[in-house]
Image (cartoon, rainbow, N blue to C red):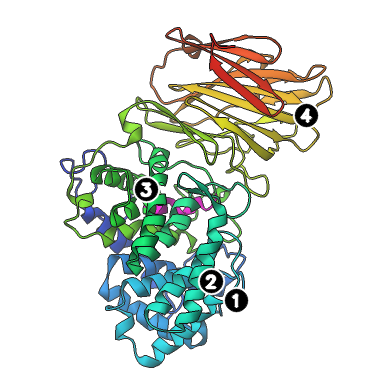
Amino acid sequence: MPFPFPLPSDDRTLSPYTGYTRAHWESAADSLLAAVAPYATADGALYHLPGDRTSWSGKLSDGLEGYARTLLLAAFRRDEKALERYADGLAAGTAGVWPRIADRSQPLVEAASIALALRLTRPLLWDRLDAPVRERAAQWLADALTAEPWACNWELFPVTVGGFLREIGYEPEAAGAAIDRGLDRIEQWYVGDGWYTDGRGRAFDYYNGWAMHLYPVLHAWLEDDPRLLDLYGGRLETHLADYARLFGADGAPMRQGRSLTYRFATTAPLWLGALTGRTPLSPGETRRLASGALRHFLDRDAVDDRGLLTLGWHGPEEAVLQGYSGPASPYWASKAFVGLLLPPDHEAWTAPEQPGPTDRADAVTPVRPPNWLLQSTASDGLVRLHNHGSEDVRYDPYYTRLAYSTVTAPSTSYDNSVIVDEDPSRTDIEPLGAGDDWVASRHTTGGDARVTSLVLARGAAEVRAHLVTGAAPGTPVRITGWAPHEDAQAELLPAVGLLEGPAGLTGTTGDGPTLFVALARLTAEPDPRPLADLVSVRTDGPDGIVVSWSGDDSVRARLEDGAAFVGEVNER
């Protein structure tokens, strides 16, 4: 079902790829705000959106979430009429309706959205409030300065609250201390080249863009602090060079990581780069990517017939939710509208759209901090992510599979996995490096087995090699490929040590390390060349292969337990 409210007509002159202009963004924001208004409580302090689901924080916190996240949308839109409603809600909420901000509590998250919205619209909202309301609101927010966050992107919520409170002169020393503490803490998770982990370990996903970059860069921009903006803006600019490659030609972001129900919040760092001038992207490329993502979701049931964002990816989808996902959680998508802070005459709105990375040419791009390989093809607009370095603290299908794409979703049948002795788990992922057309890692299964994996890619073709060690002789091994999808063709062919089976490719371990190799492809081309015509593999000893691509160039690869070596075929 398309977006249930009218949008302006497409402008294919200014926006040949998406048809969307600033007017479309403004209309979408207005429609989303109008749709949630009937679900506000009489005093405006809570927004109880319909649905059977309640987050683990409870209904009261969920109602605050509805207020805070939609207030942020009204702030980016600078909608004075809507802001009047939220002013009433602020007065009531801080008079005892809202739960207090406590250690590691959901209200700490929502306080950041409220503080940011108040800071962005200070002449329109905060400065018009009665003095007692301002005092109560500042007191409520001030608890965020000392509340202990979870050790992840939550460290930035006190920073955001502190920035506003310091600006209005409320407890400036405590606010400054909270800012310094949060910014200091995220330094331990910066791993270079524009990438953060979301807390300890190797959790790489969209929280890089819509949290770890968004809050520090906005803070630096609002503070008008050149030093901070050079630091955090420089990191954002570096990050966007990789980030821009995560979007398919149809606008779909990569379907990987947590909180995917935030959907077009994935566009926030794109706009942020344009807002601060810290971006490697042209204005037309920025809008092409951002508008492509917004249109992708509005055209694919992200919004129901009441105009409400649903809990899911396209339509409702339980698999992408977490325990903290309440009825209003999807409205973190409001962050996408940070682009409306750009004036209408900014080039990001007035320049003709230009092609994004996926539109321009086939590419295989290593992303070294997360140890990923991004593989995109211009003929069908698909992007594939080969994951050899990102994992959550537990087995999570949206973190720990070998590969993801802009069209497929992780399946319950363990797509893109190496299943040793019926154990599909993949934990303790150890990055082994990435090159121009390859990436490698080692992981463990639930038993004693270790799997060293290597993927080589060219065009849409992939060679996947897995060396299994630590398993008893005769242990069954099953290799799976891409999940089926109605808009793309998934292929998996045996190359070394494998036979075709009903649920993937199968083999057994020998007496010692055993190598298994498969050819894989995910393509939306209507009549693709046979995969076997594009690439072939022959063995090169017990732990090596020679990969021959069409065009006669060849690559030699060798795997050891915890090591991978890749070079031209004439190298020894």
Q: What amino acid is at disc 1?
A: Ala
Magenta stretch bounds: 258-267
Cα separation, mark 2 vs mark 4, equals 44 Å
Binning the other alpha carbons within 10 Å of mark 3 as few (below 14), some (14 to 19) or many (20 upward) gives many
* Numbered tag placed on residue 285 in the rendering: none
Q: What amino acid is at disc 2?
A: Leu
Binning the other alpha carbons within 10 Å of mark 4 as few (below 14), some (14 to 19) or many (20 upward) gives some
* Numbered tag placed on residue 237 in the rendering: 3
Q: What amino acid is at disc 3?
A: Glu
* Residue ID for mark 1: 102
* Residue ID for mark 4: 421
Q: Nearer the viewer, residue 234 or 338?
A: 234
Which element is circle 1 on? loop
Who comes first in sequence, dot 2 or dot 1? 1
Binning the other alpha carbons within 10 Å of mark 1 as few (below 14), some (14 to 19) or many (20 upward) gives some
* Residue ID for mark 2: 108
Cα separation, mark 1 vs mark 3, equals 34 Å
Say how many tags the image has: 4
Please tell me whether mark 4 or mark 3 is closer to you in this view.
3
- Name the spot of residue 154 as percent of width and height, x first: 54, 63
Q: Residue furthest bottom?
A: 132
Please tell me whether mark 4 or mark 1 is closer to you in this view.
1
- Name the spot of residue 446 as percent of width and height, x first: 77, 38
- Name the spot of residue 421 as percent of width and height, x first: 78, 29
Which element is circle 2 on? helix
Who comes first in sequence, dot 4 or dot 1? 1
Cα separation, mark 2 vs mark 1, equals 7 Å
Q: What amino acid is at disc 4?
A: Asp
